[in-house]
Image (cartoon, grey):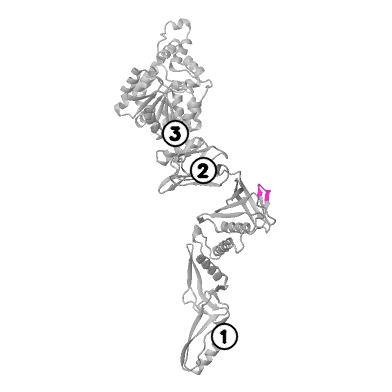
Amino acid sequence: MYKDRLFELIRKGEVALWVGAGFSLYAGYPSGKQLAKLLYDDLTISEREDVNIALPLPGLAEEYRRIRGGKNNALIALLNKHFSKAPLSTEYHTKLSQIPHIKSIITTNYDTLFEKAYGENGQVLYASNQIPYIDSGKAQIFKVHGTLSHPESIIISTSDYNRFFRVDSERSVYWTVIKERLATKSILFLGYGLEDPNIDIILGKMEDELGPNRKESFLLSPDLPAPKINELARRGISYINLKGEAFVDELFSNIKDNIYSDFDTGKIDASTHSKFVANFGHLPNYAVKNEKLKITSIGHKNTSYEAKLKFSFLQDDALNGSLPDLLAGKMFELEIPEGRMQAPILEMDGITISRSMTSLTLQLAPVISTTIDIRFDDGFEYFGIPFKAYKMDDAAELRLYPIGATIQIKLPFKSKSDEGINFSLSYTHDQSVKRIKDEIELFELLDRLTKGNRFYAFEKGKQVYSASLDAILEKQSPFEWYLEYFKLLRKIEICYKLTFQGVSIEEVTEQTMQIARRAVASHEGVEMEFDIPGAYWRLPYELRSEEDKVELQSFLGNISNIVMGSKEYISVDLHGHTLSIGFEIQRLMNPIIVSEVNFDIPVMSEIVVKSANEKLLIRYSKEHLFGNTET
């Protein structure tokens, strides 16, 4: 119960560690009791006669100093001898240094295990004059008993304790910061037993300073007897029966199981999340969605890594038979709809990524994953296409990822003919267009692939493949239509001095094609030809005199020069831009009169004119037919 609560507090970044000598035993360094014995053994036989071997470490250190002339030299030399040697292991200190949730470590130890484990990510603090330079971006390691690199800072004897805890600490900036950590964080005592004099001094100090207002406290120690557990409870400390090393292992596993869900639920920030998962090579990408920071994708610093997906289906689920088919290469992918997976767990490098997947698409792993350049016989080239090849039971599936789309080509293993390779091709376009130039290259590529043009594939400058795929389109390729469209848009970008951005591929229609054609025709001053089956013009006329009759006859003799013009200057909207294209001028191609002309005077009638080949010609002008000019 207490352990789970402690795990949760640590994962929320709400715990400071207070670490004693017991946590350095695995590294080969002495406990407080063992250090006292080392001090005693360093005395001569005659010197030992005046010393009580049962004294705790501070008392023995006090006697040792007195016997050695009241100076610290011999005491510091002995500490250096035993704590400056190379450790047997740094495993558990290193693991703690990989947990960015823990930002405060207070230790009474003289060894340098924490300093070496944290390296540049930790800041060692042992004196008040260092406090103004605390770096909040690093873990703070408070060495409350000093550091051997500065012997004057060492606290070990009874008089040292009395001076620091009863006098100096009352006015010490250093101890003020320690008290702030004790007041604002839950405390985990690691590497202490109740028989350790340090713990009694520390607990007494906490009780004096904070009383009942301090946050939760925990103490780890294996197999404490019931009276000592009761004493801890009396002092408001939750006891966890576990060795420090085992606790660190369990804590590390617990964080690995929860690190992604803790970020998703807001228990930790992106900095803490990214620092922990970086230990395993994860490179998450973050973005704000609906005013909340989310993980959009997870990269990896290594080209290969281990990922596991654990789930099950109900016994009678038809998908039970599909999964073996996928693994055997009989199908390329398997879609698992919402609600069909039981207890799904996705792991990467032993870290739980998700336990809440509702649906899933599984694909075969590629046998080839590289980047290629493609060149065609007509000279067209496309550079830097990500490429993956998948081997299935009866076919190979190739996937190319040019900018803006995914191209899928399926090649049956027995597919070669005299003309080329039989294949099926499909492609999926991204929702929006990034650059018009990229779209032109994409549809140039697709158009050539589907028309059977021979191509050559290059990897790192070396030709690795050459083939011509059988032409699969007997009529006009739809890719030609898109190619024309994006070439028109590119002309418009240049002519109208603008840029199309964020164009949705769903907005590309026959209507926008006609708008683009009109815009380009206007700028280039050319006529456009349109089919108008069954359409005609009705031209009203009135004859009131012989002069009108002569004028009508002249008009009929020049029927091929008849034009109609718009009254208003025309502007069109295309993908977020308004384009001014001019006055529209229409004329019929090969006009013929299809109605009788009445020359009686007076008369009001009409002439019906149509195109002999049912075509209309349209152009645009900056000037109106009657001389008005758009300004």
Instruction: Give me the residue at 52% from left, 38% from top.
Output: 307
* Magenta highlight on residue 463: yes
Q: Can residue 125 be seen in this view?
A: no
Q: Is mark 1 on a helix, strand or loop?
A: loop
Q: Is residue 595 left or right of residue 387?
A: left
- Which is more N-terminal, label 3 or label 2? 3
- Which is more N-terminal, label 2 or label 1? 2
Residue type highlighted by circle 2: Gly
Name the mark nearer the viewer: 2 or 3.
2
Image location of residue 138, percent across then percent down: 46, 34
Out of 8 and 582, give the one closest to the viewer. 8
Label 1 to label 2: alpha-carbon separation: 78 Å
Location of the N terminus by quadrant is top left
**Mark 1 lies on residue:** 558
**Mark 2 lies on residue:** 321
Residue positioned most to the front: 316
Label 2 to label 3: alpha-carbon separation: 36 Å
Label 1 to label 3: alpha-carbon separation: 89 Å
Q: In this view, does 132 lie to the left or right of 598?
A: left
Residue type highlighted by circle 3: Ile
Q: Is mark 2 on a helix, strand or loop?
A: helix
Q: Quadrant of residue 194?
A: top left
**Mark 3 lies on residue:** 255
Q: Do the residues labelled 1 and 3 touch (CB within 8 Å)?
A: no
Q: Please give the label number shown on residue 222.
A: none
Magenta residues (range):
458-465
Q: Is residue 555 visible?
A: yes
